[in-house]
Amino acid sequence: MLEGNASNKVWLYGEHIYYLIRTDTDGTSALELWRMELDGSAHDKLCTYFEDRENTGAAYAYDWYFHNKYAVVMYHLMDLERGGFSTDTYRIDLSSKDKNAVRLDIPEEISLGNPVAGKGSELYCVCGAEGNELIKADLNAGTARPLCTLPFEPDPFSCMLKDDALIFAEGWELGKILRVDAENGKLVTIASAEPQTRRWYYPYGNYIFGSNTSAVPSLAGTEVSDLSGNLVIELPYSEGEADIIISKIIGDFVFGYERSAASSDPTALPLWYLDIKELGTDRFGWHRWAPEDQR
């Protein structure tokens, strides 16, 4: 569905799917915002950005992602002679008619390049040399401020925003579940365990999900805990069964892919799912689904 130098970061907003393309012409580059219908048809170019940037003899790069109704774009400019780089951060409001790229007025030392959680116009990112400076941004206001310094570098999938707090599930390297107040940055440890003894990876809703296949044989399987780290249910892998790794959680469903299939085919689909509504019943477990041509 995507042609040219398109990003694999596509975003559903309203009744359309949006994506960005970087174009390179005569030594200069620009970003284009495109939109398509939900069935992948009718690709329309909406806007072009940064095409009028002067050639300053510096190297530049773009990073971007989507959050709520916004595309967030980082324009990195590197001075090849003196070294160092600067970053300008922009927001593009997908709900607006003109869809201009508006530069955010945020301190130079703050980057919005690694989002971990967000809701509405609020966005939480980590930046800094150690990847552990937690930043709170308001995309409506175009502002951002430091919230706290985390004692670890978080995995981007290990965090969720719930009840005015960020919940981090860092069971592998750190062995902790932590809560960070979303307003004042106060950090509290909710649960502790020896690293690599609990599958605390994906906090979602009222639970924390985790799966492991081969790194620690004793942990081969899927674990569901509550937000205090208490075990709710464990689904161990039996010999001959597929080793399933969680890939995405959407709505009431946890999707997973087979490790053996994904290792041989990076485009392998997540063919298994857990139905969160089935927790507490005999039905809870991995179910297989797939398009007809992959059954």
Image (spheres, rainbow, N blue to C red):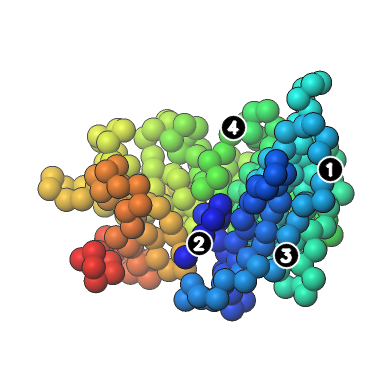
- Whole-number angstrom distance, CA of label 2 to CA of label 3: 17 Å
The percent position of residue 254, horizontal first and vertical second, equals 39, 60
The percent position of residue 177, horizontal first and vertical second, equals 52, 42
Q: Which residue is mark 1?
A: 54
How many C-alpha atoms fall within 10 Å of the one at disc 1: few (<14), some, or many (≥20)? few
Q: Which residue is mark 2?
A: 2
Q: Nearer the viewer, mark 1 or mark 2?
A: 1
Q: Which residue is mark 3?
A: 47
Is residue 290 visible to us here?
Answer: yes
The tag earlier along the polypeptide, 1 or 3, is: 3
Residue at image location 28% in from the left, 69% down from the top: 291
- Whole-number angstrom distance, CA of label 4 to CA of label 1: 40 Å
The tag earlier along the polypeptide, 4 or 1, is: 1
Q: Are marks 2 and 3 in contact (CB under 8 Å)?
A: no
Q: Secondary structure at mark 3?
A: strand
Q: Is residue 67 left or right of residue 211?
A: right
Amino acid at dot 1: Glu
Q: Are marks 1 and 2 in contact (CB under 8 Å)?
A: no
Q: Is residue 113 left or right of residue 57?
A: left
Q: Is residue 9 left or right of residue 72?
A: left
Q: Secondary structure at mark 1?
A: loop
Q: Is residue 135 left or right of residue 105?
A: left
| Mark drawn on residue 152 | 4
Residue at image location 84% in from the left, 43% down from the top: 54
